[in-house]
Image: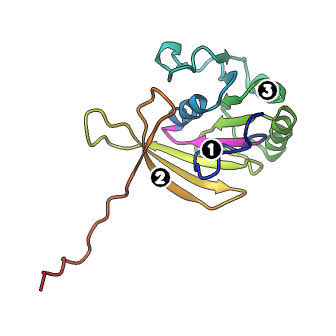
């Protein structure tokens, strides 16, 4: 039995729910989630999308479990998402809708996720989410401070069951392992000299 979510893990997506990610780093967030979800993965993106996940460049273990679906048109894409969410053996469904998600569509996807006991992650354009979503993440890459650094800023902007927050994460894209990066603090007043 898959856990509902991992206690104390801020990046654990609640199962049986649909979540959203927006921003330039939304695909990196999706790959991070794919590496963390055991079992079959489904990624649904429009047939006209110019970029596709390159199977050999994915985190360890993801390429073998990933099924890519490329429907023609938004209606077919949403139908594929709903059907994939209802499929019980699927662990995570990632989709890239091109249009804003209406409340009715969002609710249908939530019901499908509940029925299939699956997590969904919609990679949306800015401000194109549904009010029915469980969580909404804003994901942005940050400038690297070192040659091997892959910093991301993941902000939880909507959360039906908790608080909102943001984190700076160093994730190298090869596994589910990551490092939290402490916030840099600026001193607004000079330090007191020792007495």
Q: Tag 1: Cα neighbours inside 10 Å, few (<14), some, or many (≥20)?
A: some
- Judging from the image, what secondary structure is the residue with disc 3 in? helix
Which residue occupies 66% across, 27% down?
38
Question: Which of the two marks, 2 or 1, is nearer to us in this view?
Answer: 1
Q: Element type at marker 1? A: loop
Give coordinates of residue 142: x percent, y percent: 37, 44
Left or right of 33, for residue 118? right
Depth check, mark 3 against mark 1: the one in front is 1
Point out the image quarter for the C terminus: bottom left
Q: Residue furthest front?
A: 1
Query: Which residue, given by chain and number where applicable, does mark 2 sit on?
Result: 167
Separation (CA) of disc 2 from disc 1: 13 Å
Q: Is residue 159 magenta?
A: no
Side (left or right) of 104 relative to 135? right
Q: Quadrant of residue 158?
A: bottom right
Q: Which residues are magenta?
A: 17-25
Within the magenta stretch, is there residue 20? yes
Residue that appears at 72% across and 56% down: 160
Q: Of callouts 3 and 1, which one flags the residue occurring earlier in the amino acid sequence? A: 1
On screen, residue 50 versus residue 128, left or right, reads left
- The disc, 2 or 3, on the residue closer to the chain's N-terminal end is 3
Residue 24 location in percent, x, y? 48, 38
The span from disc 2 to disc 3 (Cα, nearest Å) is 35 Å
Q: Is residue 175 above or below residue 70?
A: below
Q: Which residue is mark 3?
A: 75
For the residues marked 3 and 1, what is the alpha-carbon distance in whole angstroms? 29 Å
Question: Could you tell me which residue is drawn at 17 percent across and 81 percent down?
Answer: 192
């Amino acid at each position: 039995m898959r856990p509902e979510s991992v206690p104390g893990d801020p990046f654990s997506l609640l199962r049986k729910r649909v979540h959203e990610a927006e921003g330039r780093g939304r695909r990196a967030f999706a790959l991070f989630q794919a590496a963390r979800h055991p079992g079959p993965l489904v990624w649904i993106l429009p047939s006209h999308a110019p970029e596709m996940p390159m199977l050999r460049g994915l985190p360890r273990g993801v390429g073998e479990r990933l099924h890519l679906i490329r429907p023609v048109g938004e209606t077919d894409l949403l139908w594929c998402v709903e059907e994939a969410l209802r499929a019980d053996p699927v662990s995570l469904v990632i989709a890239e809708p091109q249009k804003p998600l209406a409340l009715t569509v969002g609710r249908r996807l939530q019901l499908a996720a509940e029925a299939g006991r699956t997590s969904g992650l919609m990679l949306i354009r800015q401000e194109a989410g549904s009010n029915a979503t469980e969580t909404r993440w804003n994901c942005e890459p940050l400038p690297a401070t070192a040659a091997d650094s892959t910093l991301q800023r993941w902000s939880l902007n909507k959360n039906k069951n908790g608080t909102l927050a943001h984190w700076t994460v160093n994730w190298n894209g090869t596994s589910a392992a990551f490092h939290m990066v402490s916030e840099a603090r600026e001193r607004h007043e000079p330090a007191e000299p020792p007495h």
